[in-house]
Image: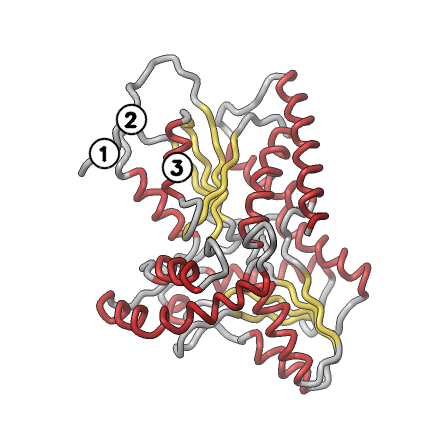
């Protein structure tokens, strides 16, 4: 194996700590060619599709990419902003604010973000941090619920990069936070804020991203963690079992996936006489194609066409103060034991920088 060439090691150099927030990724543009490149990388991941490579190569290149790329490009175009993909915009803001919130808590750490598929890629971000002398890295996935298809795939990419590095930094991995108090309370606040302005629905739908059922049967804990998140959130909101329903979205292919499926469930609710539903997607911490287009546009249309009268999508946590405090708390717990505490003067400077970061985030949000 060949290793990357690194600068000559020097003794006495102060090592630094960084947090790397990793999200799924997004195409670089809402065009057929860009979406095709993105889907090719995403759907070729062995963690995502566990089909023999020769068979899957034919399906992917012969059926999926030629037809799905243009269809998906139209969907991306419907949600694209002047600053780019919503997922990338929100993830970039979250990284900026997370650094500020951790600074307020007294931690001198750098925060970068990376995408599992697309840019900035995990290898490019890790290479930059390595070159800048970061010797302690906390890998924080944007997936509250663990799955081999998401969190483990992030870990794979991190490990694959460092297989080529001679001087590997100290690594810590955040596996999940589906039942963390700060995450659940941020979800609760998001729902309550929405209800304060719009009133309560007849039914709250909690829609999570789906997985093939075979993954559950082979030991993936994702299904269980989704239901635990839903139960904890319902308890915080004081909901009975009849007040909410858990569903799964974004099915791909003909195989059976985790059920109940979101669109048919919402359709059935409307046909049964439910006039208003609110829907939240707790598995996503940043709005993206699956929330803004699939849920807020497609599933909304399904509900209304089936006789429903009012459909409300509750946005993801995004950059809400409750969530950014919560994300900082989650990161801080995993930083324990590393020498990240800053001096009093530097801490005050970090507080000022945090205020500037929040003001910038609000400005960007106002422009949207």
Circles 3 and 1 in contact, beta carbons < 8 Å: no
Nearer to the camera, 237 or 153: 153
Residue at x 70% of width, y 69% of height: 278
How many numbered circles are shown? 3
Is 55 on the left-hand or right-hand side of 82? left
| 340 shown above or below 40 | above
Q: Secondary structure at mark 1?
A: loop
* Sequence-first tag of 3 and 1: 1
- State the residue position of label 3: 126
Circles 1 and 2 in contact, beta carbons < 8 Å: yes
Q: Position of residue 124 (x, y in %)?
A: 38, 40
| 134 shown above or below 164 | above
Residue at x 31% of width, y 65% of height: 50
User: The N terminus lies in which quarter of the figure?
Assistant: top left
Q: What mark, if any, has residue 6 been given in the picture?
A: 2
Q: Secondary structure at mark 2?
A: loop
Nearer to the camera, 78 or 42: 78
- State the residue position of label 1: 3
Circle 1 residues within 10 Å: few <14, some 14–19, many ≥20 = few
């Amino acid at each position: 194996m060949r290793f990357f060439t690194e600068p000559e090691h020097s003794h006495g150099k102060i090592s630094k700590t960084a947090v790397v927030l990793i999200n799924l990724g997004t195409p670089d543009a809402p065009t057929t060619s860009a979406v095709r490149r993105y889907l090719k990388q995403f759907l070729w991941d062995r963690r995502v599709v566990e089909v023999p490579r020769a068979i899957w190569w034919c399906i992917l290149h012969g059926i999926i990419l030629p037809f799905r790329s243009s269809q998906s490009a139209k969907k991306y175009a419907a949600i694209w902003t002047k600053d780019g993909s919503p997922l990338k915009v929100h993830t970039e803001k979250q990284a900026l604010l997370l650094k500020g919130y951790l600074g307020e808590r007294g931690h001198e750490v750098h925060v970068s973000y990376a995408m599992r598929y697309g840019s900035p890629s995990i290898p490019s971000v890790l290479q930059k941090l390595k070159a800048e002398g970061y010797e302690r890295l906390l890998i924080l996935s944007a997936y509250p619920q663990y799955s081999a298809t998401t969190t483990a795939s992030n870990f794979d990419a991190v490990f694959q990069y460092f297989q080529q590095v001679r001087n590997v930094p100290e690594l810590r991995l955040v596996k999940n936070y589906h039942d963390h108090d700060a995450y659940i309370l941020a979800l609760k606040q998001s729902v309550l804020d929405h209800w304060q302005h719009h009133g309560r629905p007849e039914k709250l739908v909690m829609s999570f991203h789906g997985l093939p059922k075979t993954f559950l049967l082979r030991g993936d804990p994702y299904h269980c963690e989704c239901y635990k998140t839903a139960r904890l959130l319902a308890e915080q909101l004081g909901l009975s079992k009849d007040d909410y329903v858990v569903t799964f979205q974004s099915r791909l292919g003909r195989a059976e996936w985790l059920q109940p499926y979101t669109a048919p469930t919402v359709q059935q609710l409307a046909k049964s006489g439910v006039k208003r539903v609110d829907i939240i997607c707790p598995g996503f911490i940043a709005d993206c194609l699956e929330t803004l287009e699939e849920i807020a546009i497609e599933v909304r249309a399904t509900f209304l066409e089936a006789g429903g009268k009012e459909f409300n999508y509750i946005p993801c946590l995004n950059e809400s103060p409750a969530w950014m405090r919560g994300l900082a708390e989650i990161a801080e717990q995993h930083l324990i034991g590393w020498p990240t505490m800053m001096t009093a003067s530097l801490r005050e400077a970090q507080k000022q920088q945090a205020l500037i970061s929040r003001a910038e985030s609000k400005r960007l949000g106002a422009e949207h």
